[in-house]
Amino acid sequence: MEVIRGAQIRKTSIRAVRLPGAWLACLLSVALATPAWSQTATNPATQVPPGPTSGVLEPTPPPTGLLRWLDPATAPFLPVPLIGVDPDSGTTLGLLPVRLQTDENNDIRRIIAPDVLHNPYFGFGTDARVYDYPSEDTQWSIVGGIKQRVERGIDAEYQGGRLREQMLSINASLLYERSGVSRFYGIGNQTLLADQTNYTTQQELAQIQVGLNLSHAWQVQYTGRIQVVDVLPGTLTGIPTLQSRFGDVIGIGTTAQLLNRIAIGYDTRDNVTAPSRGVEWQVYTGRANRLSLFHEAMYTEAGFDGRDFWPISADSVLATHVSLRYLPSTHDVPFWALSNIGGEQAQIGGQQPLRGYGIGRYYDRDSCSATAELRHRLMTINAVSSHIELELAPFIDVGRVFSDPSTFPISHLHPVGGLGIRGIARPFVVGYVDIGYGHEGVAVFTGINYPF
């Protein structure tokens, strides 16, 4: 695992409070709702003055008492089964009572979603979530949760200037996380599944990103991040702890770092959340120092991240992604700060997707990854409170890590093939279930947002 799930920070998500796969079911269940879910004006039909009652059928009164809980039009929330799947975390089951608030255009503006759950590793737990979408230009969220054993966390995010219509765009994130499912297999592109170990991660993070919009497409962005990470012994039964097998690896114990990064970006996407055409390219360079008396240099970084979206037909988009990350200079770099591939999300300057493996399956100094997926809209459910698109997306991921910068980056790649199932409530929400197959077997991921 790269320790911060939200390093990108297009959207931070952390394991301790991770979004379950119930979000895909949640989006589809919106189709069952009626305008009673919306916080908008009353239906005009109900405002017409009453006329003569003779010969006119009276409307059926809304259900009351316990019956109102069984009707999506009058229930205070949507009861959605919670099914969270991850190759490292196991299968989490529970109940997600979701409250959706929509506007006069039936666009989702707020999601309130607490839950109760059970995880086979950490017992019973609960989460609370609020996602707010005041406009396409501004979003914020707060997610927090705790389980019986080990895991807890809170994640707060704000995004402003997403459309780049103002001079500045700002993303801010605060994160506390304690996760017990992290894995480490050693360093290198050919580490073995048999060398799997487990460790517990506790981290605190504060990050700010400020983008100077030179035009609607061009942006210069500064990222500042303070991060404190504690790598502690693992607690999972049957899996050796990292300390017992890799006791000499750099990064065990507490490490504090300050990262400064400058990036130049070019973005012509037609939609920030669910693009159908355009490109998003970014080149970046940065330096990380230890938070100590002398602020010793930890590493420098340089990389490229490119995302392209090609409309193939009215219902299909070919989406591609390529990423290269190099660490030109290093000095006692903790393993969790190295380049890594594995998991389902592409993060600029961080984790890269390889959806047949868990997060952080391969670590080394440098990395290369590429992805292509064909996003095909299978159907659209025109509900009275929203419009839900069901999308299928066969995909191919390839990637590798390496320690020598002269290495040819597209040799000895790890291939993964699979299928993504997505539910989209435009303009803000995408829920997914991604199923990938690599040489170690099948991996399933669930959550929100596209992988890239």
Image: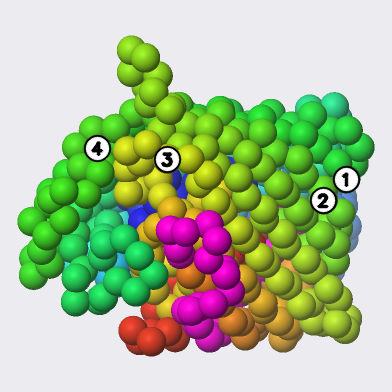
> What span is in magenta?
401-428
Mark 2: which amino acid?
A: Asp
* 29 in relation to 259, above or below: below
Residue 152 image-quadrant placement: top left
Q: Are marks 1 and 2 in contact (CB under 8 Å)?
A: yes
Mark 4: which amino acid?
A: Asp
Residue drawn 37% across the image and 14% down it: 294
The answer for how far apart the CA atoms under marks 4 and 1 are is 39 Å
Q: Which residue is mark 4?
A: 230
Magenta highlight on residue 417: yes
* 359 in relation to 136, above or below: below
Q: Which residue is mark 2?
A: 267
Q: Which residue is mark 1?
A: 217
Magenta highlight on residue 393: no
User: Is residue 407 visible to the viewer in this orientation of the structure?
Assistant: yes
Q: Secondary structure at mark 3?
A: loop
Q: Residues within 10 Å of mark 1 (few under 14, many from 20)?
A: some
Residue drawn 39% across the image and 74% down it: 357
| Residue 447, position as x, y percentages in the image | 49, 63
Q: Which residue is mark 3?
A: 330
Lower sequence index among marks 2 and 3: 2
Lower sequence index among marks 1 and 2: 1
The answer for how far apart the CA atoms under marks 4 and 3 are is 20 Å
Q: Residues within 10 Å of mark 2 (few under 14, many from 20)?
A: many
Q: Are marks 4 and 3 in contact (CB under 8 Å)?
A: no
